[in-house]
Image (spheres, rainbow, N blue to C red):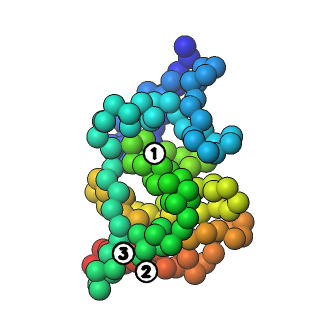
Amino acid sequence: MSSSLASHDGLNPGQATFVPEPKEGEWAPHVGRGMRCVPKLIHCAMREKRSPTSRARFFKTDAAGEPVRDWLKGLPIAERKTIGEDIKTVQFGWPLGMPLVAHLAGGIWEVRSRLNTRIARVLFVLDGDAMVLLHGFIKEDQKTPKPDLDLAKERLKLLKR
């Protein structure tokens, strides 16, 4: 079994994580996702009731609204389930990278969910051991729309005050 030593953001400087190279059959397909895969290690962690490496919580407005939760409630059940599974995968596997997670700007990251006929994004920020879900949207263009990124930045400012 070959392996590599990989350093990740979010760890103390000089700290590294042992990352085994995948072998045939070591990647478990993510349900309903075609070619998208999630490491078997993450599926095992969720199945064994291990604690997540980060807690997910919804950003709350001053009026106690939760825009991401409200957005999710407006989606079909199958799409909610897919997005929820992706968020849970990030919770248990952080730090993760592409194709599931990408860094956008400043401290803002995105969970990238491929739905049956479209693509969803949930923008989040790490706040201590929590991932705060700032904004969710259905992506229609190749690039993340500036208004969506600006909204997430504005919510981040509100979160930090």
Q: Rounded to the nearest whole Å, what is the CA distance between mark 2 and mark 1? A: 26 Å
The residue lying toward the viewer, choosing from 77 and 2, is: 77
Residue at label 2? 154
Give the residue at x 35% y 71%.
59
Gap between marks 1 and 3 measured at Cα: 21 Å
Q: Residue drawn at (36%, 75%), measured in percent from left and top? A: 66
- For label 2, the SS is helix
Residue drawn 31% across the image and 36% down it: 49
Q: Quadrant of the N terminus?
A: top right
Mark 2 touches mark 1? (CB < 8 Å): no
Q: Which residue is mark 3?
A: 66
Which dot, 2 or 1, sits closer to the camera?
1
Side of 138 where 136 appears, left or right: left
Q: Secondary structure at mark 3?
A: loop
Q: Is residue 13 above or below residue 131?
A: above
Where does the image place residue 22, in percent across and percent down from the top left?
A: 58, 24
Task: Decide which of tag 3 and tag 2 comes sooner along the chain.
Answer: 3
Name the disc covering residue 89, or none.
1
Q: Nearer the viewer, residue 65 or 20?
A: 65
